[in-house]
């Protein structure tokens, strides 16, 4: 387990080293390290109206959910030695996809509680927005993943990768699901153009307005870990995960993941933020019917061809 | 004692403590969080009892949806008022005998179960692992339990419509009405001033404030 | 069998009694509601434990249905609470809602 966390931290750290300075455009490879140091040594401020228990707990929940979700992403075939093997836990492998959805649904708590416990109206509005947004888009995320699972015939992530290793990647078989997943994933991680919970032009900083120092850093890291997780999941579910020619498994996953990370940053740099009612309408009256129709069509096709 | 039993006991202890916290906390938000913790512990117990799918569903439905709904409600309503009043009913006279009876009854029931007396299906590890598998559950759900399954979807639909009907309209419509009236009033005020010059104060937004 | 049946039943009994105590003793309707959820989950644990014990999947199917009912119930119940508090009386004390018509 310790080995796994070490590995995980290395990956996250490395990704942030590349991501941070690239986007900010200043400093070199040491910039995120300096940021982390600064946040570590900042004073721990707690607002007067904040909830004593929940205020410190909320960022921890966020970070925990983000890290725990990452655990079921397969890095390579099972036969590999410890460390690169899937650290799926005791018996989770069989329902890996459900585990992932379940854990990522726990991430909402961090946002809601962070918003509520700060005792500030900006935080509260941010928290409410975050909750509504994440809950509605999780539905679409789930439906998109279920249609892929239908094609794969398994809920285990390794099985999904295995199904693609010998045939076509599921992005070709399930293009609609992939697009739905992509939109839902951006919304789920509260990234631009769906970053309404932390829309700084209207809400200061949303649910983490009152947070500073290490606690803010935890929210921040959680967001990036979430981005990494959904990217890794996208690579796993739609682009055959670790399988690929020549290079060993983890490398392929890493390359595919990086492509998605780039896409995330790209989106953020390009697209303006949506309005809140647009966001909700997009979710409930465009994407949800589309996801349901796609699921139905997939089910029919799978039933006929099997 | 084997490892699963030890884990079971640890999780059970956490579940009991947090469930007590659910009913004893003054702040309903804290109660909700402890309820979520209880659910997570129960999901862990389900995994130990070879019900992985049910465990995952439990986490998704309860922790991911129902308790978030609770939190949402609490944020919509003002819960701080309710925290200052008295928290407990004066029903100890009623509660005490019920509690004694129930504890006696349940204790007797749990104690009376003789494990060897019941026809326990001896499961191999493989069989046990397949018991709660998605395939097994799905097979059963879509054959023997097809009608209940369809009825369950009906229940959900009715619940959805009911919830929207109860909470959706009413308040919102009235607020919307007030907002429209205010806007119209503002509009007429502006029109009345038209031709002349507008007072600077009157150029402000309608009294209803910004639209959400 | 890895976990003795009695342990699971005892835990379920304790949780159920806790939930019942919450329903009887608390005033806050939200907490009463949560106590009901607690009781539902105690029964879920029993169903899963028996399902494992008899090697029969029906118990888990039952849990599935309990989850469905719980979800519908939470949606409708919370909607009722919201509309009660907004339209009728601005309070979360269950005792204050004592009229048959709003």
Image: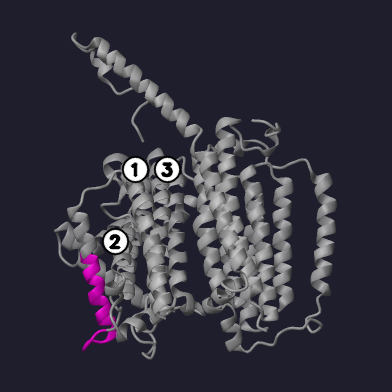
Horizontal side of A160 relative to A179 (left or right) equals right
Asked if B199 appears above or below A193 in the picture, the reply is above
**Chain bearing mark 2:** A
Horizontal side of A199 relative to A28 (left or right) equals right
- Of helix, strand and loop, which one carries label 1? helix
Q: Which residues are magenta?
A: A244-262
- As drawn, the label of residue A36 is 2
Q: Give the residue number, with chain letter if any, for mark 3.
A: A124
Position of residue B206 measured from the top left corner of the image (x, y, whole percent): 33, 22
Residue at position x 30%, y 65% in the image: A176
Q: Quadrant of the C terminus of chain C?
A: top right
Asked if A169 appears above or below A209 in the picture, the reply is below
Q: Quadrant of the N terminus of chain C?
A: bottom right
Q: CA distance from mark 1 to mark 2?
A: 36 Å
How crowded pointer 3 is (Cα within 10 Å; few <14, some 14-19, many 20+) is rated as many
**Chain bearing mark 3:** A
Position of residue B203 measured from the top left corner of the image (x, y, whole percent): 25, 19
Tell me, yes or no, whether the highlighted magenta stretch contains residue C80: no
Horizontal side of A259 relative to B119 (left or right) equals left
Residue at position x 23%, y 71% in the image: A258
Q: Give the residue number, with chain letter if any, for mark 1.
A: A277
What secondary structure is the magenta-colored segment mainly?
helix
- As drawn, the label of residue A254 is none
For residue A212, say whether it is visible: no
Q: Residue furthest top?
A: B196
Between disc 3 and disc 1, the foreground one is: 1
Residue at position x 19%, y 8% in the image: B196
């Amino acid at each position: 387990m310790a080995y796994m966390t070490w590995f995980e931290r290395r990956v996250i750290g490395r990704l942030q080293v590349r991501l941070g300075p690239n986007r900010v455009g200043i400093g070199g490879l040491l910039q995120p390290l300096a940021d982390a140091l600064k946040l570590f040594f900042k004073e721990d401020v707690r607002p007067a109206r904040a909830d004593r228990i929940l205020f410190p707990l909320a960022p921890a929940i966020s970070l925990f959910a983000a890290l725990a979700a990452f655990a079921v992403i397969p890095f390579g075939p099972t036969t590999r030695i410890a460390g690169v093997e899937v650290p799926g836990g005791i018996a989770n492998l069989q329902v890996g996809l459900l585990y992932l959805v379940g854990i990522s649904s726990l991430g909402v708590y961090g946002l809601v509680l962070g918003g509520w416990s700060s005792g500030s109206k900006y935080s509260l509005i941010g928290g409410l927005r975050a909750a509504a947004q994440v809950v509605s888009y999780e539905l679409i995320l789930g439906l998109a993943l279920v249609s892929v699972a239908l094609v794969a015939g398994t809920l285990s992530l390794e099985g999904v990768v295995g199904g693609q290793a010998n045939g076509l990647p599921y992005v070709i078989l399930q293009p609609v699901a992939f697009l739905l997943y992509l939109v839902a994933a951006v919304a789920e991680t509260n990234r631009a153009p769906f970053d309404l919970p932390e829309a700084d032009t209207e809400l200061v900083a949303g649910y983490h307005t009152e947070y500073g120092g290490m606690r803010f850093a935890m929210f921040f890291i959680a967001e990036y870990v979430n981005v990494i997780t959904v990217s890794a999941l996208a690579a796993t579910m739609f682009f055959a995960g670790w399988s690929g020619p020549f290079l060993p498994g983890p490398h392929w996953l890493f390359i595919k993941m990086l492509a998605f990370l780039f896409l995330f940053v790209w989106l953020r740099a390009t697209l303006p933020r949506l309005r809140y009612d647009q966001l909700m309408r997009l979710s409930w009256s465009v994407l949800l019917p589309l996801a349901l129709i796609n699921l139905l069509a997939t089910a029919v096709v799978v039933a006929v061809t099997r | 004692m084997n490892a699963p039993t030890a884990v079971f006991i640890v999780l059970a202890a956490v579940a009991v403590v947090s469930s007590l916290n659910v009913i004893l906390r003054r702040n309903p938000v804290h109660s909700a969080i402890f309820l979520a913790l209880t659910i997570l512990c129960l999901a862990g117990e389900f995994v130990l009892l070879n019900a992985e799918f049910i465990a995952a569903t439990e986490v998704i439905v309860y922790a991911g949806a129902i308790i978030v709904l609770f939190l949402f409600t609490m944020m919509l309503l003002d819960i701080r008022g309710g925290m200052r009043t008295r928290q407990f009913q004066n029903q100890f006279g009623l509660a005490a005998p019920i509690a004694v009876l129930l504890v006696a009854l349940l204790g007797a029931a749990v104690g009376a179960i003789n494990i060897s007396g019941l026809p326990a299906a001896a499961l191999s590890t493989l069989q046990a692992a397949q018991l709660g598998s998605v395939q097994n559950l799905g097979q059963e759900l879509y054959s023997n339990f097809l009608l209940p399954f369809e009825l369950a979807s009906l229940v959900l639909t009715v619940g959805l419509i009911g919830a929207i009907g109860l909470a959706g309209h009413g308040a919102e419509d009235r607020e919307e009405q007030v907002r429209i009236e205010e806007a119209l009033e503002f509009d007429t005020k502006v029109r009345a001033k038209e031709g002349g010059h507008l007072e600077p104060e009157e150029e402000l937004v309608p009294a209803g404030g910004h639209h959400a | 069998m890895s976990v003795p049946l009695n342990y699971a039943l005892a835990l379920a009994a304790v949780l159920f009694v806790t939930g019942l105590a919450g329903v009887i003793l608390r005033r806050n309707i939200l907490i009463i509601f949560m106590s009901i959820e607690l009781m539902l989950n105690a029964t879920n644990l029993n169903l899963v434990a028996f399902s494992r014990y008899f090697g029969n999947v029906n118990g888990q199917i039952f849990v599935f249905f309990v989850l469905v009912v719980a979800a519908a119930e939470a949606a409708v119940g919370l909607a009722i609470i919201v509309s009660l508090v907004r339209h009728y009386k601005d309070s979360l004390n269950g005792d204050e809602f004592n009229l048959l018509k709003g």
